[in-house]
Every structure is written in C-alpha cells, then in structure tokens.
Image (tube, rainbow, N blue to C red):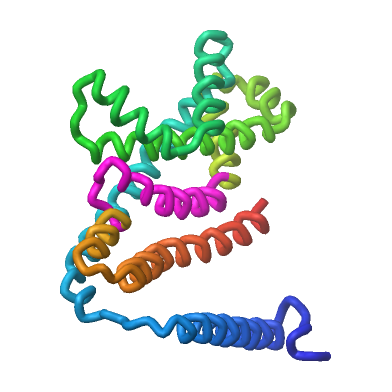
Amino acid sequence: MNLLFAPSRGPAARLAQAVSWVLVAVLAAGLFSFAFNQLHYGWNWPAIWTYRQKFLQGWLMTVAISAVSLAASLLIGLLTALARRSAFLPLRYAAALYVESIRGTPLLVQILILFYVVANAFGIENRYLVGVLALSLFAGAYLSEMIRAGIDSIRDSQLESARAIGLTPAQTYRYVVFPQVVRQLVPPLAGQFASIIKDSSLLSIIAVSEFTLNAQEVNAFTYSTLESYLPLALGYLLLTLPISLIGRVLERRFHFAA
C-alpha cells in the first residue's frame, strides 16, 4: 500500500502523517519564498530589532487579557445558560436578548459602544478593564450556547432518575448535569480561547497596548510595514497553534471517553 495512503493506525500511519506534514510544509515554504522574492523589498530588520521589547510587552499583554477574558467569559456563559433555562420569564428573555445581540453584531462595534458610550456614562476610564469586559461578554454569549446545548443533551431519564433518588435541583446539576457538560465543553473551549486571542487585536481601536497596537506603533516609528506585521502574525501563531493542537487532542480523548 502506498505510504501516503496508509491505514489510520500503527507506525506506518504515523510515518505517513510525518511525511505528509513535511511535504505540505515544504510546499508552503516554497510558495511564500517565491512570493516574497517577487517583491524586491528592502528589508529593514535592524530597525525592528530595536523595538523587540515593545513587541514582547504587547505579546504578554495579549496573553494576560485573553486569559482573564476566558475565565470571565466562562462565568458569564454559565450564568447566561442557566438564566435561559429559568422559569422567571424576564430573566430568560434578558439572557436571550443578550445572546442574540452579541452574536448578531460585530465585536468592533461592541467595543466602541462599550467604551465610548456605556463606560463613559458610568465614569469608567480604564480601557483595559473595558477591553476585558468586551471580550468576556462577546465570548460569554457563544459559550452560553455551548453550555445550554450541553445541558439540553442530557436525557430526561437521567434527570428523572436523579429526582427519584432524592437529589435536589442543585445536586442534580452538580453531580449529573455539569460533569457531562464539562466533558463536552473542554474541546471547544480550547478553540474559543484561540478566538479570544485573535479577537483581542480589535482592542487596539480603544488604544489598549496589546500586541497589535504595539506593532502598529512600531510600523509608525520605522515605516517598515512588513517587518512590523510579520512578527505580529508569528506571535499570534505561537499562541493559537498550540491551543488548536491541544483542542484536537482533548477532542479525541473526550470523544473516546464518551
């Protein structure tokens, strides 16, 4: 059998995957090398190297903002998912309005309105706080739908069994519902974290000194556009690629655990 069409398991399959990845990487590298060579561009990397600390500070700020936003969005998503299942109709409709409004409008517009309208009305001037809140609200709306779908996937027979053995609603959620929801949520959560990292670049619109804004400032200082934005792309890739790989591993692990 041809190596590149080896079965999905065993040493031959792993060798085929390695060969395929190398082949794809070589082709991609060749394509980009050809494209850049056609530019006849005068590279100015020494000027960019002078601002290496600014790139690092922006990169670390992006990591911090994304991590805090992910934790906050988990809490917001959980509370919203529970609110959408509430018997109290105003609470249920408010949660539905929040989810549909966030999912139906661009994040860029949400950031602008939250900072220049809502935060200004309440006298909040900390743009980092507003940036984290904007990302958390945006991701929380999507996470709430994931959590709600996970809860809805629990069979009625399990809930009836929990009531039959005397579990309270809180105990049912804790011991029956949430363990199964978490198992379903962990794999897409990695993808959501990668999305938050990339979406954080939009915070540059309100002058949050994250990775993208710092790269823009370096470009303004040096007039070296490609040299400023190529490290930006690499920096995001260094964050999102491992997360995507971890997400795939978790997806396979929890799939077989189901």
Q: Residue furthest front?
A: 40
Is 22 colored magenta in this rendering?
no
Identify the image quadrant of residue 23: bottom right
Residue 26 versus residue 189 in the image, above or below:
below
Q: Nearer the viewer, residue 166 or 250?
A: 250
Compare residues 65 and 110 and report the one nearer the observer: 110
> Could you tell me what secondary structure mostly forms the magenta stretch?
helix
Q: Position of residue 46 (x, y in %)?
A: 21, 81
Q: Is residue 54 visible?
A: yes
Q: Position of residue 77 (x, y in %)?
A: 48, 33
Count of numbered badges drawn on the protein: 0
In magenta stretch: residue 186 = yes
Above or below, 52 against 12 in this view is: above
Find the magenta span and give its range.
Answer: 185-211
Residue 41 vs residue 61: left or right? right
Query: Residue 6's quadrant in the figure?
Result: bottom right
Q: Is residue 87 above or below residue 143?
A: above
Instruction: Name the residue: 24% across, 24% down.
Output: 120
Q: Is residue 171 visible?
A: no
